[in-house]
Image (cartoon, coloured by chain):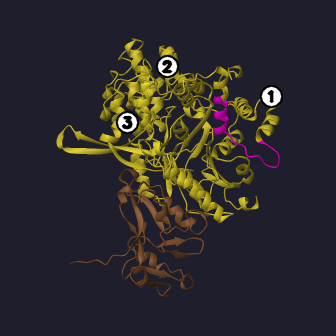
Amino acid sequence: MAEFLKDPLTKVLFIDLNKLSYHIEERPELFEDYLGGTGVGIQLLSEYCPAGADPLGPENPIIFAVGPLVGHYPLASKTAALFKSPHTGNLGESHAGGRSAVALRMAGYGAVVIRGRSKLPVYLVITSDGVVFRDASAFWGMRSSSSVGSVLRMREEGSGLRSIMRIGRAGECQVSYANVTTETYRHFGRLGLGAVFGSKNLKALVVSGKHSLPVADKRAFRRIYDEIFREVTQTELMKKYHELGTAMNVNPLNQIGGLPTRNLTSGRFEGAEQISGERLREDYLGRRVACAHCPAACIHLAALRIPYPHDPYFYKTLMLGYDHELIYSMGSMLGIDDVPGMLQVIDEAELQGLDVMSTGVILAWATEALQRKLISTKETDGISLQWGQASGYISAIKRIVSQPTEFYRHLARGVDQAASVYGGEEFALSFGGNEMPGYHTGPGAHLGYLSGSRHSHLDSAGYSLDQKSLKNDQPLTAEGLAENLLNEESRISVRPWRRSGENIPRRISKESGRRSCMRNMPLSAGKVLIWKVSAFQAGFWKHPPQQE
Amino acid sequence: MVKRLSVIDVDLCVGCQACMFACVRRLGKGGLDGTCIHIQSAGGISKGFQVIVCRACDNAPCARVCPTEALVFREGGGVKFSAELCIGCENCIEACPFGAVFWDQEHQKPQICVYCGYCADYCPYDVIALEEIEAVNCG
């Protein structure tokens, strides 16, 4: 224990945007009670997000947290962001890689808590020396979030050792599913962290540092490192992510009828082969890149060469990230089977700083609503939305941000909001306010989206349970399914680390007075339940508790 | 013949920085302070990466500007560093055109590759390798 305490993962950086000031607190117990950024982040959220907080008000904190493995071991490259979601009104939890986690740890911080609202647009430079507040007025309103990245890259120090997290216009305009982009190709994508940045007049964070980390047992450290490194570089374990990437899911999902197509009017897409991982690799894969300290290198960039219509001797070559969720939401879901079209729709969403998954589902709903005449081109500002027609979708994405009509103002709040105004709720594909992911594999997937604490496919991996049961021809019982989903979610979400015989759920449950409700449940399920109860009490849950 | 770390093909680099962490781990630490190899994007990740490491020059500029002989030429190319002779003047950092002389913040001394090849063992894509220095032969 004493050796562990040498680890500098103790500092929480508090930033107050009202006063443009900061201070650092030593919270060693926080990082000992919770192994990993998610637990630390949720604890900080429960401390600093007041009940009934307006997600777009200065009282909603933005919390970034990393865990003890970051900077020591390979693959530990994700930062957890916790906030109250402006999209669902519930728990906002989003994870991103890039260099974000290593940069935070190397700057000397385990977590950052950002509160308040700046009067002027600002960006923050975070290093081990503290925080510098810089005027971002000149960046506010820039058309492309990637241009902001390249300007900051020139202006600030720390190339190779830094993370540049920034929002696009979507975040500035507080579209409720605006994202935060880091290192161009990674995102805090879901649940609207970008809108929370925008509400605080916060354009970007530049985080950098270069610490070394003490190790208690050097020999054991190297041995464990080598074991992990061998597993991830020389076995099948990460091969899928390294070779085709998650885009390899497109064909198999399509074969089992699990690829949501044209607003889920079908689970099979006749154009799936054209936009599959295999086809993208063959015709478009231009580069593979990695997050800091992750040799798996799962980021796949397509090189797209586009001619300019006005001059046959002008071309531009775009390098665009793709993976399964993007291919689903901007490909099959919109009936687009031509790769250049699909990539250009993705590019527009990226430039604006929108969550591509939510955007695709919302556009798919709008297309069906237009077909069913719930809306007309009057609402869409003259834009014709038709399956497979990329140009209409690109125009619509621009309007979700610029919001020229009432209709787009509703689209900018999510598919539930739009359907509550224009009808078509029966084909508005969301769970708990969050648009569906790209797996329509069976009851495991859908139950998981519904019950997961952030309504994500990553809460409980129900899609994987479905596919295993299909493969083994063993249908899951209702009880078996529920138990599996609960166990998976509790396994991957909050992990209290037992210390001196005490554990976190018991302590939290005492505080919340709900101890009895977990008495006869396995600890893991109890944990999830307790967190949900506390989340409800903290005002995250907008629905009555009996739905839980 | 003496060896140096060669960049075999920078276009194979994915930017995982496993080499940088390896260089620090060689000394029994985690993190990045003290690494003698640096990976950064070539102007944004879409453009790929640059590997910055000592290329073991003949008549190395860093050793030529060292006022205390803390840095001396290694026979066959490259340099040898004696920390106890170093006064921390940073001339060597200025002199290296690659930026491959790094700064050890803990000890306030330069840090230069010792040509051990430990980092290359952790490059999964054969971007770098420890190789014998070839004499340039112009025919």
Residue drawn 64% across the image and 65% down it = A219
Residue drawn 23% across the image and 44% down it = A315
Number of numbered discs visible in the structure rendering: 3
Q: Quadrant of the N terminus of chain A?
A: bottom right
Which sits earlier in the primary sequence, circle 1 or circle 3? 3
- The circle drawn on residue A411 is none
The residue to which callout 3 is attached is: A348
Horizontal and vertical percent for residue A290? 46, 50
Which sits earlier in the primary sequence, circle 1 or circle 2? 2
Which type of secondary structure does the marked residue at label 2 adopt?
A: loop
**What colour do you see for chain B?**
brown
The one nearer the camera, A68 or A181, is: A68
Disc 3, disc 2: CB below 8 Å?
no
Mark 3 packing: few (<14 Cα in 10 Å), some, or many (20+)? some
Left or right, A162 with reference to A544? left
Judging by colour alone, the chain drawn in yellow in this rendered image is A
Q: Residue furthest top?
A: A373
Q: Residue furthest bottom?
A: B68
The range drawn in magenta is A484-503
The type of residue carrying mark 1 is Asn
Look at the picture and state if A484 lies above or below A9.
above
- The circle drawn on residue A428 is 2
* Mark 1 belongs to chain: A
The residue to which callout 1 is attached is: A520
The answer to whether any part of residue A71 appears in the image is no
Which type of secondary structure does the marked residue at label 3 adopt?
A: helix
The type of residue carrying mark 2 is Ala
